[in-house]
Image (spheres, helix red, strand yellow):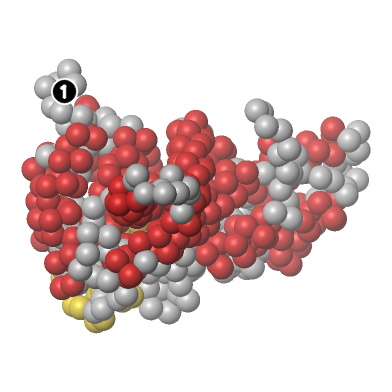
Amino acid sequence: MNAKIRALISEFGRLSVDVATLKNEADLYTAGLTSFASVQLMLGIEDAFDIEFPERMLNRRSFASIAAIEQAVSELLAEAGRDAEAA
Amino acid sequence: MNDIGVSSLHARARAIGVGVAAAHADAVDREGRFPFETFEALKAERLLGAMIPLAQGGEGASFADICDVCCVLGQHCASSAMIYAMHQIQVICLIDCASSSAWHQAFLARAARDQLLLASSTSEAGIGGDFRNSVCAIEASGTQFHLRKEAIVISYGTQADCILVTARRNPDAPSSDQVIAVIERAQYSLKRTTGWDTLGMRGVCSEGHIVEVTAACEQIAPEPFAEIAAQSMLGASHLVWASMWFGIASSAIAKAQSFVKAEARKRAGAPGGNAATPAGIRLAHIVSKSQMLKARIMEGIRHFEAVRRDADGLTSLSFTIAMNNLKISASETMLEIITEAMMICGIYGYKNDTPHSLGRLLRDALSAPIMINNDRILGNTSNLLTMYRQDATLTG
């Protein structure tokens, strides 16, 4: 899942640095993620994992780092009764 | 009078608005100069530091109280109100975001004691208008740093006591990795690069400057600027501006109302004199708009105060969309109200030398959709709406 999220960030995030250089906990906003790009990224993630982010997750923190996105996606997959490892 | 023996913020703001700001508003506009008299009075009455907590020597005024002051000043001198509003945006960022820094806590106490006027330098040549990117960078050496910034605009930069300046964290940091530092007049030099000869808001003096500063590293806020901008800054900016715009709109309505009243007096007793006139109907229309605007702003202030200590609430999609929409609707509604007031007052509103003159108000108000361009905000909102879950509840 981590590799898939990194690929999506690389595709939609328009960061000012290379995603490969970022640690899982690195702040994506200081790395150049804008509110515009974060929405594109959310749409990309919803599509790739076949999930829908609920209102409670639509804030800055849920998309602040690769680890935070991984956590949010895992939570939604678990709620849907799907295996996070297989995603 | 409140329990510390000082008359209320509203009363002090009103006295300054009526007695000082209104008296100099035309000169400030005509000469395109800083409203010195108003700011001397605001400092003397300690209104610049009013929002700073009691523990640091301020009055602990609520955000709603500060919005009220913006509205009162807006009724008398829009340039004064705009400068006051921009100053308070800097204050709220320091209050909310720099709580972990001893230097910034001490600075707030000094800002309250000395009634310091704070300006902001976020724009820069070469960033395409996106203040979330910087070209210039902090160059630290030991406990000091040096910074040189080509700022396209620093409103009242020459008159401010301190500037909150953004820059990249260090010379190797990407353009989005920004910090914000509080720099003081004795530490920086300004070299003016552009002037401020504008249609309206002529007293705000938003000139371009090259800023050069050497200061202590502890003056840099510990929080990344990305967080500061995303949290207090967005909501606070749109709300203080909307509040002062409501003040401008109210001033236009007062002029229109006095015009309609004078007309009614002339007609009183004449045959058919009690029939509604086109001007009277227009007045009813703009008062209705103004009540909607007031309700919308008060709802925005309530929403902001409810989420102010909650980073997730402040950065939620629904709050961002609500604040963006408030900025759009408040700026548009104010202009509609003033334009319609002009139709009511007719030539007396159009002329610059009558008690019903509306020219300065209209010119000042035209800045509202331009500063942080409404088209840009609508574009941003339309993008956010792709993820937004529409709230169809009325009371929820």
Between A61 and B337, the one lying in front of the other is B337
| Residue closer to the observer: B68 or B236 | B68
Q: Nearer the viewer, residue B395 or B230?
A: B395
> Residue sitting at 78 percent across and 36 percent down?
A75
Kindly tell me whether residue B201 is visible in this rendering. Answer: no
Mark 1 chain: B
Q: Is residue A10 left or right of residue A86?
A: left
Residue B109 image position (x, y, % from top left): 18, 37
| Quadrant of the rendered image containing residue B67 | top left
Q: Quadrant of the N terminus of chain B?
A: top left
Residue drawn at (88%, 49%), measured in percent from left and top? Answer: A50
Q: Position of residue B116 (x, y in %)?
A: 16, 49
Relative to B233, is B174 above or below? below
- Say which residue appears at 90% left-offset and 39% top-offset: A83
Viewport quadrant of the C terminus of chain B: top right
Left or right for A72, reference B327? right
- Residue B275 location (% of width, % of height): 47, 48
**Dot 1 amino acid type:** Met
Query: Residue at label 1?
Result: B1
Residue B100 is situated, as x and y percent measured from the top left of the image, at 34, 37
Residue at image coords 73%, 43%: B390
Q: What SS does tag 1 mark?
A: loop
**Compared to A43, does B154 lie above or below?**
below
The total of numbered circles placed on residues is 1
> Residue lying furthest front in this view?
B271
In this picture, is B304 found above or below B159?
A: above
User: Furthest-top residue in view?
Assistant: B3
For label 1, count other residues whose C-alpha is less than 10 Å away and answer few (under 14), some (14-19) or many (20+).
few
Residue B37 visible in rendering: yes
- View extreme (bottom): residue: B193
In the displayed structure, does residue B3 sit left or right of residue B307? left
